Image: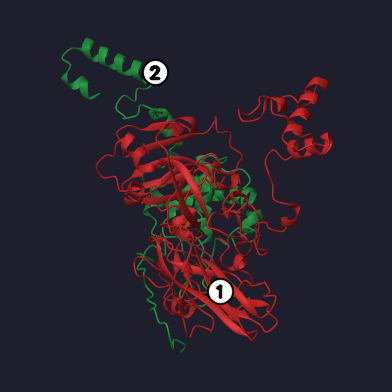
Amino acid sequence: MATADRTPTACGVLRTVAAALLLTLSAPSIAQTRYGIGRAATPAEVAAWNIDVEPDGRNFPPGQGTVAHGRDVYNAQCAACHGANGEGGMGDRLTGGAGTLATDKPVKTVGSYWPYAPTLFDYIRRAMPLTAPQSLSNEDVYAVSGYVLYLNGLVPDTAVIDGKALTSLKMPNRDGFIADPRPDVKNRECMTNCAK
Amino acid sequence: MARTPRQPTTPAPDVPATLEANTVGSAVTKGRRTFLRRSGAWVGSGVALAALGDKLYGVPSKYEAGVIRNVPKNQAQYISAASRTPLGDLDGIITPSGLFYERHHGGVPVIDPLQHRLMLHGLVKNPLLFTVDELRRLPSISRIHFLECSGNPVYTKPYGKTASDLVGLVSCGEWTGVSLKLLLDEAGLMPGAAWVMAEGADAAAMTRSVPLDKCLDDALVVYSQNGERLRPEQGYPLRLLLPGFEGNMNVKWLRRLKVTDAPVHSREETSKYTDLLPNGKAREFTFYMEAKSIITSPSGGQKIPGAGFVEIRGIAWSGHGKVVRVDVSVDGGSTWTQASLQEPVLTRALTRFRYPWQWNGRPAVIASRVVDETGYVQPAFEQLVGERGVNSFYHNNAIQPWRVADSGEVFNGNG
């Protein structure tokens, strides 16, 4: 606690800590807000809801998973929709498509299109499998993220995947995105003799 | 098992007392009859009861049963799917709630509003948790805005046949809720705050990052649409509304807002709602829906009954503000004439236009072209494709030509 630094005795520190604990345990105050409606979200509540991980590696949960375990998770949870090898079906195609983005038939997959590997972990954790989202353990999510990357040839079959591994992996299409330049097309207010 | 009409346990305040308990007792029945006679509505108790009792939430005439949302046939599955507004059947600028287009990414959840919470956290001084009732206690705002899916329609064939097939992923409603700026002020922004991540409570836990500027401008946390609580398909009990921004960012079933210093680069804003160009690069964070218009009557699938007067009618809108004019062509785009705009003309809302036409019974191609308050002119399809190619998928706001045959039948004027 910041106040503890200014408290000279051990007894004072304990009192400060006890007061802080009491504040946490009683109904949180929102006296600072203008309307005083709603209540403070406790750190524990925020931690329970705050599931998004970010491309720079922030907010990954503890844990890791192997590609080998990811294969089992994939076959049990994913293959029915995404195909035995990520080739797609009722669900999106996950693999292949390298070199197709600038062609007439672009194939957008995790390997060919996704710019950030942490997004793969984030999305699988929050939304997959479709029939039971947020039912996989963190270890399963790390493992199956690794397996999808392995299917795309981006990690070896011996890889152990954790937040650091996902953050440091540079996806093939990392630099494939540009800012919105619109309005990019300018029509004119032609009123007569406009046909080409 | 047959369902019995639901009887209210407590009468609404504006229901006459004689209608309070119409299920038991002859005295009550007599009272009801007295009331019905006095009101001049006596048509026999059975008929009257049925008319009042089983339509306590009104529905359209049975003769309008065909006016329903339009479900595309090519969807791989229905957990992540969409249905479209029947634009060709509607008048006015407010889309009825039941006909409002909807797109969901993980089904439509059933959420008990008493169990629902909105969390606001991240780079804020006071992380907050609100119930729906608490949000309703805060100062309210009502505004009319359109909502449009970013892929409305895509650029590739096969092209749709009707206005609904083509542009039915746009609707407009009156939204009531709380200013997001007010909520952010309550939480107190910390230095570095630049984006707000919005997350839904649906099975997709739909996630988009929104620039803070938009959140402090006209964004709302909405609980009602067209005067009643949001429909489940529209995010009951809470949704985000970002006027003029592509539909998927208006996160439904909203449960969490996290203030951040950078976008979270969610799956939806990297692998999905990005616009791929012919050179292989893709535009990201393409938020705005640019100005667009379409003639809805006569439109694809309809038939003009005969030569003579035809009022060409349609809708126009812009994510950048108000519609300032709409021009109509009845000669395939060679000549354009200014159409009349129906008041009210509201910012980021559907605007009705109309143009009187004497159809000579000969084949014709009709189209509309909107100009918005930024001076932006709705482009031709060829112009868009010339710049973006056909695999850009999103943000097709092209002029839509309709081909009128000598029979009066109307077809898509594009291939």
Q: Which residue is mark 2?
A: A25
The relative height of residue A196 versus residue B389 in the rendered view (above or below) is below
Q: Which chain is green?
A: A
- Read off the chain for label 1: B
Q: Nearer the viewer, residue A138 or B178?
A: B178
Residue B183 occupies which quadrant of the picture?
top left
Q: Nearer the viewer, residue B190 or B17?
A: B17
Specify the label residue A144 is tagged with.
none
Q: Are marks 2 and 1 on the same chain?
A: no
Q: Amino acid at mark 1?
A: Thr
Q: Which residue is mark 1?
A: B156
Q: Is residue A53 visible?
A: no
The relative height of residue A50 versus residue A194 in the rendered view (above or below) is above
Hue used for the chain lettered B: red
Residue B304: x %, y % from top left: 67, 75
The relative height of residue A81 versus residue A43 in the rendered view (above or below) is below
Q: CA distance from mark 2 to mark 1?
A: 58 Å
